[in-house]
Amino acid sequence: MNFELISKELLDIIDSRNIDNITHCATRLRVNVKNINEIDTTRIEKVEGVLGIVKQGNTLQIIFGPNVQQVYDSFTLLYGADNPEIKTSDRNNNSKSKENLFSRALSFLAAAFLPTMPIVVATGLISAILNILVLTIGLSTESPTYTLINAIASTGFYFLPLYVGYGCAKQLNINPIYGIFLGAVLLNQSINGVENLNLFGLPVVATTYSYTALPVLLGVIIMAQTHKFIYNKIPSYLKDVLIPLIVIAVGTLATLLIVGPLGVILGDWMTDGFVFIHDKIGWLALGLVGALFGFTVLTGTNKALVPIMVTSLATQGYDTFLIPAMLGTNIAIATATLAVAYLEKDPIKKGTQLSAGVTGLMGISEPSLFGVLINDRKALYGSMIGGAVGGILAGITNLAQNSIVSGIPGLPTMVISIPPYSGLTNMYWGIAVIVVSGAVGFLATIFLKKRGQS
């Protein structure tokens, strides 16, 4: 795939003069534009690698799946070469005014957490592999090998404030080192969870910041606002000295004295809320998520779930709500697409549908959703039925997963030996969710489409 050629085609269609800002999430290139009606989306759909397009306000979301990072790098490089006089901060300021508050918040959360995803995925897989080694070859949990691998895996979540701090600062257009520094301060052994600290008599609430994301997120926002407020008020010959000092002092102290403890409390409430929902109406809640998750992907609101899932994984080590429910949805979306391909007579359409369905089985649902299901309501309903059944089964069996993956979902990431889960039972139920949701999604789509033909 020639990413430079793809970028040139996109820039030619969109027109660099129409662009305000460029960002990306895990699968989509997000281009904020001045006038979205001037863009010929049918031409964009024909560009190599494009899996679908979503318009949201003045934001054009172009779906590239796992290739989005390479496209983003090439596209921004080409755009910057054509427009060297336009600063990133200026583009961001222009675009923000044209998005509603909810969309801006979702975009911010997605961008802030995006850099953490490789770590979350990798360490989750390492943890799962370690658990499998304990079960299959009898690796002792007291052995030096287990201790070393477990330390590597736990690092992914223990130091979460560092990763989120970096992503948040980068998104807010301040030096990412500020975010890393704030995360490091919160994790300092002289501060993290230490009792009886105070600042000139002002009490510092003893709070454990490891495995958390919200405190550093709020703290970096304060840093960014402080930076913005003082930047033009300080003489140029003092900027290099005073700006870092003031930003770090205000951001760090505000976090330790106020927003840090508040962030931990809010994070705990959020986690407790989802645990409460799971405990009270667990199987029904998972069924609803399984049925409706596809709509969150279609609308782009699925990124609001990422912080919730990461928080759950960080605090509990596993998730028994959102990720297991999404497992059935991903499979049902894929098999519903394969059902459409099974009934399709046109060989060209069948090939496209088969490709989208197989890609969906690998955990990337956008080609199925935007290429097939969005134009086939019966197949979309079939995928919802399969996702709902899979979610209900996951809820009834209390299925747990310990990683968010963009790959074959579920099997390599089942929690199989973390208390209260033991043995291979959890993995077996995971396989059952995959099989059942996939079968129901396929058969429901066949039934609905044939019923509509009769």
Image (spheres, rainbow, N blue to C red):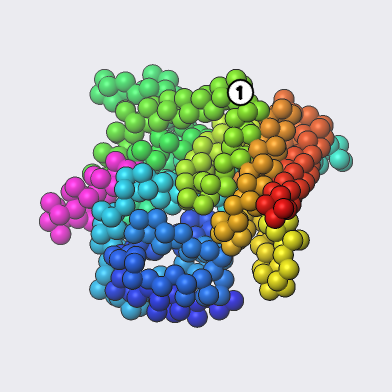
- Indicate whether residue 233 is drawn in magenta: yes
Is residue 120 at least partly visible in the picture?
A: no
Q: Residue, x 51% and y 25% (percent of image)? A: 273
- Indicate whether residue 285 is drawn in magenta: no
Secondary structure beneath label 1: helix
Q: Residue furthest front?
A: 454
Q: Position of residue 104 (x, y in %)?
A: 35, 48
Residue span colored magenta: 220-245
Q: Residue, x 29% and y 58% (percent of image)? A: 95
Q: Quadrant of residue 12?
A: bottom left
Residue at numbered disc 1 = 281
The total of numbered circles placed on residues is 1
Is residue 415 at least partly visible in the picture?
A: yes
Packing grade of label 1 (10 A; few <14, some 14-19, many >=20) is few
| Amino acid type shown at disc 1 | Ile
Relative horizontal placement of residue 195, taking residue 328 as reference (left or right): left
Viewport quadrant of the N terminus: bottom right
Q: Residue, x 12% and y 56% (percent of image)? A: 235
